[in-house]
Amino acid sequence: MVKHIILWQLKDGLSQQEKEQVKAGIKHGLEGLQGKIPGLLQIHVHTDGLSTSNADVMLDSSFEDEDALKAYAVHPEHVKVADGQVRPYTSVRMCMDFEA
């Protein structure tokens, strides 16, 4: 199994209300991929970090193997969410992929 963890910071200039809407959209969009992409075992988005956090959104996902992760990255359903709900609103992205 391969874990795919992403941390994002939202862009400066968003109001608190806009941030909440963006976070909800990211969560809804990414978690909505469950069952649509072969090899995607599990996907969770966390948006309510503690005050000690320096990231706004965390993606925690699991894949059958590295090939499934690579296929997810270019899958049209994932690209649609990434291009429409994630990339326009985030300024920093950190990723760690590993075998679990």
Image: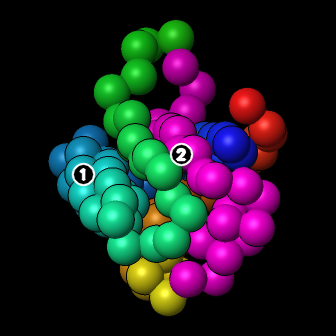
The kind of residue on which mark 1 rests is Ala
Q: Which mark is residue 24?
A: 1
Disc on the earlier residue, 1 or 2 = 1
| Quadrant in the rendering for residue 39 | bottom right
Q: Secondary structure at mark 1?
A: helix
Residue 31 in the image, given as x and y percentages of width and height: 33, 55
Residue range of the region highlighted in magenta in the rendering? 53-75
Q: Is residue 2 left or right of residue 32?
A: right
Give the residue drawn at x 36%, y 36%: 47
Q: Quadrant of the N terminus?
A: top right
| Quadrant in the rendering for residue 7 | top right
Q: Quadrant of the C terminus?
A: top right
Residue 10 in the image, given as x and y percentages of width and height: 49, 50
Q: Nearer the viewer, residue 51 or 73?
A: 73
User: In the rendered structure, does residue 88 fall within the stretch colored magenta?
Assistant: no
Residue that carries the numbered disc 2 in the rendered image: 61
Give the residue drawn at x 40%, y 42%: 44
> Does residue 70 appear anywhere in the picture?
yes
Q: Nearer the viewer, residue 1 or 88?
A: 1
